[in-house]
Amino acid sequence: MEQSFLKPSFGSRVFDLCNVVVMLVLSFAMLYPFINLLALSLNDGADAARGGIYFVPRQFSVDSYMLLFQNKHLLSGLGISILRVVVGTSTCVFMTGLLAYIVTIRGFSGRKMIRLLFLFTMYFGGGLIPTYMLMMKLGLINTFHVYWIPSLLNAYYMLIMASYMQNLPESLSESARIDGAGELLIYFRIIFPVSLPVFASIAVFSSVGHWNAWFDVILYNSNGHWDTLQVYLRRLLLEVEALQQVADQQLAYSKYRNISPLTLRAATSMVVTLPIIFVYPFFQKYFVGGITLGAVKG
Amino acid sequence: MKKTMHGNIPSAPVRSAKPATWKRTLYRERNLWLICLPLIAWVILFNYVPMYGILMAFVDYIPGKSIFTSDWVGLKHFKDFIHSPDFGHVLRNTLAISGLNILFGFPAPIVLALLLNELRKKKFKQIVQTISYLPHFISWVVVASILFTLLGNEGILNDILLRLGWIGKPISFLGEGKYFWGIITAANIWKDIGWSTIIYLSAMAGVDSEVYEAGRVDGLGRLGAMWHITLPGIRTTIVLLWILGIGGILNAGFEQQLLIGNAQTREYYEVVDTYAYKYGIQLGNYSYGAAVGLMKAVIAVILVFSANRVSKKVLDTSIF
């Protein structure tokens, strides 16, 4: 708000105070669940089952984490999740960027047609079952490729990237073209370096999406061969499964006797959440710009 | 790419006076089209082929056979769904959950954006905003984990209620159907209230600050300015998002139901999408599932068009 030369009235100051209090309560509501999970995950398992842990661990113990990182299910899930994020994000960002570049080349006769072809898919689709049947026919079921090939191009990302590239000076690519550079070369060497902010914001959207994906894993990889970290965490949420996991682990490593499903679940949730907490604040200005742009254009 | 790609200079001047026929254009742009070809093939395969696959809703589809050699049954699957004993509660849950989402989830970010907009300290505002975005980036699996932890028998909510002496024994919040709608509405709001303010805040930034000055001179208080200047200033944005929200009224969510719901609460969490998934994929009735999904999509389109018409008439704002 614009600061005024007028002295704020008493009512106005009361309003400000209430507003700040509301904001503090809101921030607490947003953060508290994670604080609680963190406290639980760092607590002794048997002790945590007694309840009453709110902000800090009562009996500090890192056993849950130690156990997690010796669990081959979790480690393979973590590996597959990371692989999915890396492969899925890099291919999506580069291919969608290329698409966005092509639909912004002035004078290209197919530009409008291609743009429309993709925009249409934002509003209409085949739905769950026809898409599932397609994946089955293509032989993508129970493979790693189902994670990145169907999400290679994205119409919404294309819109955001294209609206950024449209504002670049025409002379950039024009001069390269006169020097005889091909379109792919122009894209990689000229457009990509100057469009880094928009590539970064799309990379954040895409990687968070891949990291958080759960349903497509259980839908397309029902045999469990390519289970990601999210699927592993979901299993722990089912009480019986969680107890089984704990029992298996305790059999293998007798020193972790004091693990309970509660603390194991909390620790796994933290492992899934921490990378996001560390990454998203730094990219905030990019994705906020991206979403406003997308909303205006879309 | 080789350096000798003179062929694809789209905006290069045409050297001769020959008229630019489509063949000549295509030849001139051949390298560009070569890049486009795989992109176009991808979108046709992954987005347009499934649209054609919707036809399976009108036949008795058996995997391995093609849609055209399967028996044509017309609207049989649609009728089956309407007459099935599940139809009533599936429709009720879908409308109730998405209705609650619109009723509470739609105004909540507007109120939050109005309050954020009034914060005087820039730094404080930024920190609150950053914190409020956090839940948006968290997967539904983690949200389910949080709910299990907070609302479980040994969870904090039960703990506090027991200590206060309001209840005698722990309540199984997630195991009883009557709590489900409330829990899922609260979870939806918690997850997206901050994220949804982005668009309203950017609309508020566009309101002319001179209007506020003028308002203040005319004796308008803070609340008055919010009501008479800021809200009307973002009216178009609100209406647009409202129309789009109506179109999504049958999108009552999907992952959250599967993750937070369980066998005891099925009566209250089963929505159209989870129903289509259960019958179409888990039980293998592909045609039936596709019909349920298609019915939902058609209703959504009708709703968007009607909402658009109403807002055109009443508020003079529309999306098309």
Image (tube, coloured by chain):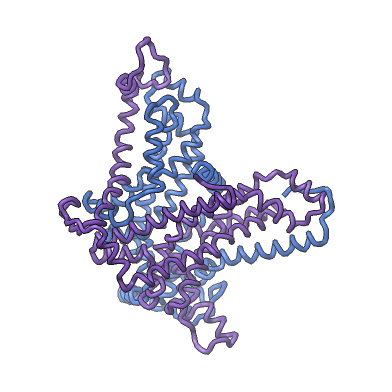
Chain colours: A blue, B purple
**Left or right of A247 in this view: A55:** right
The residue closer to the viewer here, A138 or A179, is A138
Residue drawn at (45%, 45%) of the image: A203
Name of the residue lying farthest toward the bottom: B168
Q: In the image, is residue B316 above or below residue A244? A: above
Percent coordinates x, y for residue B248 in the rendering: 45, 57
**Left or right of B189 in this view: B116:** right
Name of the residue lying farthest toward the front: B313
Percent coordinates x, y for residue B137 in the rendering: 48, 57
Image quadrant of residue A233? bottom left
Percent coordinates x, y for residue B226 in the rendering: 70, 55
The residue closer to the viewer here, B11 or B280, is B280
**Left or right of B13 in this view: B284:** left
Residue drawn at (50%, 54%) of the image: B307
Percent coordinates x, y for residue A210 in the rendering: 39, 53
**Left or right of B58 in this view: B131:** right
Q: In the image, is residue A258 above or below residue A217? A: below
Q: How many marks?
A: 0
The residue closer to the viewer here, A283 or B119, is B119
Q: In the image, is residue A250 above or below residue A209? A: below
Residue A142 shows up from this direction = no
The residue closer to the viewer here, B82 or A93, is B82
Residue B189 shows up from this direction = yes
